[in-house]
Amino acid sequence: MNDEAVIKIFRYLERYLFEPMKNWPKDEFEKRSYERWAVYEIIESLMNNPFTTADTVIDEFILKMISFAHLAKEQKQQFIFAIDVAENIRSLLM
């Protein structure tokens, strides 16, 4: 089960990726929004795959984001933000 991983990730989200403020610069607001989106996607994947190790779920997410970044033309950066967050989470869980 991935319960412990999900709890650690929620703590990471609350501590380091708190919600952006409306007065933040647009690029920082968007970056934080994409980072938070990535975290929630990872959490959902972990919960939907309780018998797959957290490392495997995160690695699959990273591969998916690499594929999307490769295919994306103008919105490539959001997938790069997601990859960075996933790598941070993977390190956190080690």
Image (tube, grey):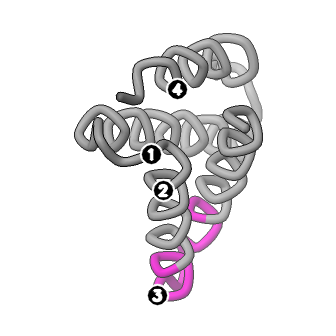
Secondary structure found at label 3: helix
In front: label 3 or label 1:
1
Q: Quadrant of residue 8?
A: top right
Residue drawn at (39%, 42%) of the image: 41
Provide the residue span drawn in magenta.
67-79
- Circle 4 residue: 5
Which residue is at the front of the view, 51 or 40? 51
Who is closer to the viewer here, 83 or 29?
83
Which callout, 4 or 2, points at the residue further toward the start of the chain? 4
Q: Of residues 66 and 53, which is closer to you in this image? A: 53
Q: Amino acid at mark 1?
A: Thr
- Amino acid under disc 2: Thr
Residue 89, given in percent of the width and then of the height, sits at 66, 39
Q: Which residue is mark 3?
A: 71
Q: Pointers 4 and 1 in contact (CB under 8 A)?
A: no
Q: Amino acid at mark 4?
A: Ala
Instruction: Residue 3: give x, y in percent of width and height.
Output: 41, 20
Which residue is under mark 2? 56
**Label 1's element?**
loop
Mark 3: amino acid = Leu
